Image (cartoon, rainbow, N blue to C red):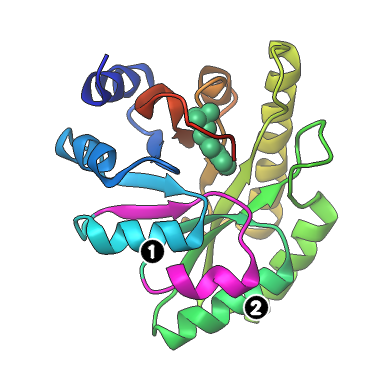
């Protein structure tokens, strides 16, 4: 199947209210243009310079989402145009994003990334760290940041029960934060969870954004 066909197939599998992020990391401009021509407007990348270059080379109505661990010294490459950063895992990162957003006279949308997987290698916050960040956010420490919700990655495993449990944990974290801190904030509404291998389970658990790469663009040449 070609990219456009795979894209259409996934579109029919996910509910209308769930945003499909086409994860184009490592893939060439031509593949992204093909998906764009098939109607896709939201793309995910996990390397700041690569995303900067692709933004320069492709149509300007693409929404670029940053989905990987973001080093503070790389924020400047994406601050002028990024639509949503999924991977907030420290207050230091918010300090830098706020600073770079101010330089660009804009606000930048962000998600708090939670550590939900049974793996030590994945980045992310726990509830206590997230609560501390939200308290500082609501004290207006980062006026150029807008928090839209949460993100998480499940363990890389075939154990569907475990994956579903991890997604439910993220949904429950979101529900607690929403109730406690954002009951009247209509912007805090996103739960970014689900990739090629597990998006069906993520959607069942309440995902509002799925990040799908290999099922659209094919396997990547190297893991990263
Ligand atoms: C690569 C990546 C994805 C997409 O993975 P696929 O298995 O190719 O769908 C989703 N989320 C994050 C954070 C990623 O790094």
Image position of 167 (left or right of 203): right
The residue tagged with tag 1: helix, strand or loop?
Answer: helix
Residue 3 x/y as whole percent: 27, 25
Label 2: few (<14), some or many (≥20) within 10 Å?
Answer: some
Name the residue rendered at 61%, 60% in the picture: 70
Q: Residue furthest left?
A: 37
Of the image marks 2 and 1, the number of the one nearer the N terminus: 1
For discs 2 and 1, the disc positioned in front in the rendered view: 1
The reply to whether residue 143 is in sight is no
Residue underneath mark 1: 52
Image quarter hosting the C terminus: top right
Looking at this view, is 123 or 77 the one in front?
Answer: 77
Residue underneath mark 2: 95
Distance from mark 1 CB to nearest ligand 1 atom below 8 Å = no
Residue 151 x/y as whole percent: 61, 45
Residue 212 x/y as whole percent: 45, 31
The residue tagged with tag 2: helix, strand or loop?
Answer: helix
Residue 1 x/y as whole percent: 27, 13
Image position of 92 (left or right of 198): right
Q: CA distance from mark 2 to mark 1?
A: 21 Å
The span picked out in magenta is: 62-80
Give the vertical position of 79 relative to 42 (above or below).
Answer: below
Give the vertical position of 105 relative to 169 (above or below).
Answer: below
Name the residue rendered at 33%, 45% in the picture: 42
Task: Give the total of numbered labels.
Answer: 2
Name the residue rendered at 40%, 78% in the picture: 106
């Amino acid at each position: 199947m070609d990219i456009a066909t795979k894209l259409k197939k996934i579109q029919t599998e996910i509910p209308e209210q769930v945003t499909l992020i086409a994860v184009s990391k490592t893939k060439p401009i031509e593949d992204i243009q093909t998906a764009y021509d098939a109607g896709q407007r939201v793309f995910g990348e996990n390397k700041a310079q690569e995303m900067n270059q692709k933004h320069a080379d492709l149509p300007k109505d693409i929404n670029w989402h940053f989905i990987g661990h973001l080093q503070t010294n790389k924020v400047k490459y994406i601050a002028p145009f990024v639509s949503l950063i999924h991977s907030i895992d420290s207050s230091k990162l918010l300090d830098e994003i706020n600073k770079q957003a101010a330089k660009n006279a804009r606000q930048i949308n962000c998600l708090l990334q939670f550590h939900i997987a049974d793996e030590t290698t994945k980045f992310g916050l726990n509830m206590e760290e997230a609560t501390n960040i939200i308290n500082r956010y609501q004290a207006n420490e980062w006026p150029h940041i807008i928090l839209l919700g949460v993100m998480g990655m499940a363990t890389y495993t075939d154990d569907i029960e475990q994956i579903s449990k991890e997604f439910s944990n993220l949904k429950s974290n979101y529900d607690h934060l929403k109730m406690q801190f954002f009951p009247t904030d209509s912007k805090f509404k996103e739960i970014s969870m689900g990739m090629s291998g597990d998006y069906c389970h993520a959607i069942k658990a309440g995902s509002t954004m799925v990040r799908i790469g290999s099922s659209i663009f094919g396997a990547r040449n190297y893991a990263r």
